[in-house]
Image (cartoon, helix red, strand yellow):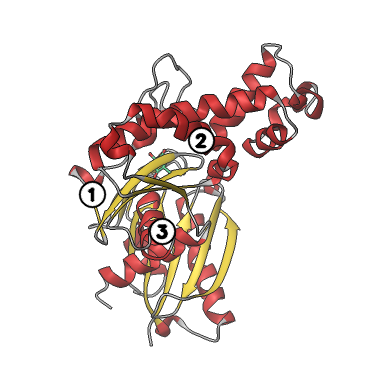
Amino acid sequence: MSHFIGVDIGGTNIVFGLLDDELNLLRKSKKPTGAANGVDYVLNLIASTIDELLAEQGLSRADLGAVGMGNPGFVDPERGVALSSANLKWENVPVAEKLGGLLGGIPVFIDNDVKMYTYGEAARGAGRGYKHVLGVTLGTGIAAAMVNEGKLYYGSGFLAGELGHVPMEGESALCGCGMRGCLETIASATGIARIARERLERGEASVLGEWFPGERIRDITAADVSRAYDAGDALAADVLRFVGVKLAIGLAWAITLWSPDVVVIGGGAANAGERLLAPMREALMPLILPMYRNRVVIKPAEMNDDAGVVGSAAFARSRAGL
Ligand code: BGC
């Protein structure tokens, strides 16, 4: 019986999953990425963690059918190359070949992280039972992916879905991609924290100013903004409404172009839940035609961390023909 490994690599953490041949998740592990230590450090860490997971389950490399990995950035899944990743600072890394070598020749398949996440949610999470699933993750970065009747849509250069890099009118924050005012600078976890911080620095009143006095203002996270919202803070509510409206503009274009049955929203910033999704839905509905409005379901993701690893493992299993 073949087993599979799914790896979801992010700028901060790497999540690993060991799955059986029916894609049941047997074991999970999470490690800091340590991207600043360079590509070889990260790939060696991945290989040694895979060995650890196998040993914990009483298995060896011989029991592995394939390894799948979701990478934050542009990927060529046919050649297994990470073309460019602003969050990892990787350029043209032949991940499948290098990691496959470290693992003694086990087939390794890589793809974009949000494509893998959406593949997982479409098969086993909030997209289950729908034909046309649009996944959007709001993490450090933002991207979208479309799964149509079980198949990912890639577009030219495998680049379909880079929704984080559409410009928002009137916005000018510098994005990791080098452009300014991208949706990702606003509707991401880092964007929410930045906007709250900037408004505090402009002297606006908020309980966040009491919780994070002086220099500590730099420590504010998106989760703190949600906490302040729950404490009835007007600035926090306004920041989440503002972010929700910008996200709605991005989603209006995506829904109109792709006409999904369901939009599954995941990623760290989506932990704000209805605090963010309620103003987003309210802003979105007048921006899309009634025919979309009456069909499209907008839902939070269901699998959290598991979506990326299950999606990557499922993708690897299918690419390996197992
Ligand atoms: C990248 C995408 C990636 C997303 C989430 C964006 O900045 O351009 O390729 O999928 O972040 O990690």
Q: At 43% from the left edge and 57% from the top edge, which residue is drawn?
A: 126
Q: Secondary structure at mark 2?
A: loop
Does residue 218 sit above or below 127 in this rendering? above
How many numbered marks does the figure carry? Answer: 3
- Residue 95 visible to an observer of this rendering: yes
The amino acid at mark 3 is: Glu
Residue beneath the point at 56% across and 47% down: 12
Residue beneath disc 3: 121
**Picture layout, residue 291 above or below residue 113:** above
For marks 3 and 1, give the CA distance. Answer: 17 Å
Percent x, y of residue 180 = 41, 21
Q: Which residue is mark 2?
A: 188
The kind of residue tagged 2 is Ser
- The residue at 78%/28% (across/down) is 212
Residue 302 in the image: above or below residue 87: below
Residue 84 is situated, as x and y percent measured from the top left of the image, at 35, 42
Please tell me whether mark 3 or mark 2 is closer to you in this view: 3
